[in-house]
Amino acid sequence: MKRKIILNLAISLDGYIASEDGGYDWIAGHGDNTLNTENKFDFDKFLEGIDIVVMGKNCYDQDMHNDYKSKKVYVATSQKLQNQDNLHFISGDIVKIIQEEKERDGKDIFLFGGGGLVDNFIKADIIDEFIVGIIPIILGKGRPLFLENNPTIKLHLDEVFVEDGITILKYIKRKTEDC
């Protein structure tokens, strides 16, 4: 089966993936389970199907890579940093490198934060699945998920999960004949 690039992250209702200072402490439900779906998104199961994680330098600086010690982690950065253990620092064309990984055998690739990094993959139109958790909050300002001048990418809603007011939408790219 072909390896997929899967974007999986949380956004505010108004489209931000982090506060202005890069914080994410606002990512929480609203404490009401009355609309929960029977089917739940299982993040641990999701991670079992992943062997590569791609993140930006800001996520790395917040030690988010520590959650993925058993995975190969690519960190996009403008700095020249030395690879260490499972960490691979990429200051060049991260999209090209991940596209090459996608062609190799293995599990899926987890594309994770930030907006500038994700923007490169959206513009290259190589994300296969979008799993977006909508957090019940309007931040008003912060770091946006989508930057400008993106291509049109038609999606198909594959699954919906609701837990504690957080709606998780799983989209897959439409096949070209479906467009």
Image (cartoon, rainbow, N blue to C red):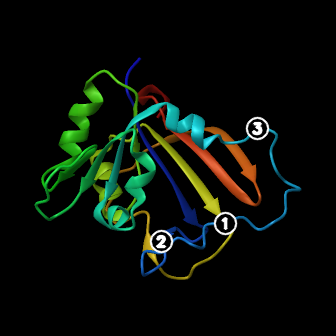
Callout 1 secondary element: loop
Type of amino acid under label 2: Ala
* Residue pointed to by mark 2: 18
In-front residue for pair 147/22: 22
Measuring 32% from the left and 44% from the top, which residue is drawn there? 125
Q: In the rendered view, tell whether residue 168 sits above or below residue 61.
A: above
Horizontal and vertical percent for residue 24? 52, 70
Q: Quadrant of the N terminus?
A: top left
User: Is 103 left or right of 83, judged from the image as shown?
Assistant: right
Inspect the image, locate mark 1, and give the three-letter code of the amino acid beneath it. Answer: Ala
Q: CA distance from mark 1 to mark 2?
A: 13 Å
Which residue lies under the disc numbered 1? Answer: 28
* Label 1 with label 2: CB-CB less than 8 Å: no
Is label 3 in a helix, a strand or a loop? loop
**Number of other residues with Cα within 10 Å of mark 1, as a class: few under 14, some 14 to 19, many 20 or more:** some
Going 66% across and 42% down the picture, which residue do you hit? 41
For the residues labelled 3 and 2, the Cα–Cα distance comes to 27 Å
The residue sitting at 20% across, 61% down in the picture is 77
Q: Residues within 10 Å of mark 2 (few under 14, many from 20)?
A: many
Check residue 39 in the rendering and tell me which mark sits there, or answer none: 3
Position of residue 70 measured from the top left corner of the image (x, y, whole percent): 40, 39
Q: Earlier in the sequence, mark 3 or mark 1?
A: 1
* Residue 22 occupies quadrant: bottom left
Which mark sits nearer the N-terminus, 3 or 2?
Answer: 2
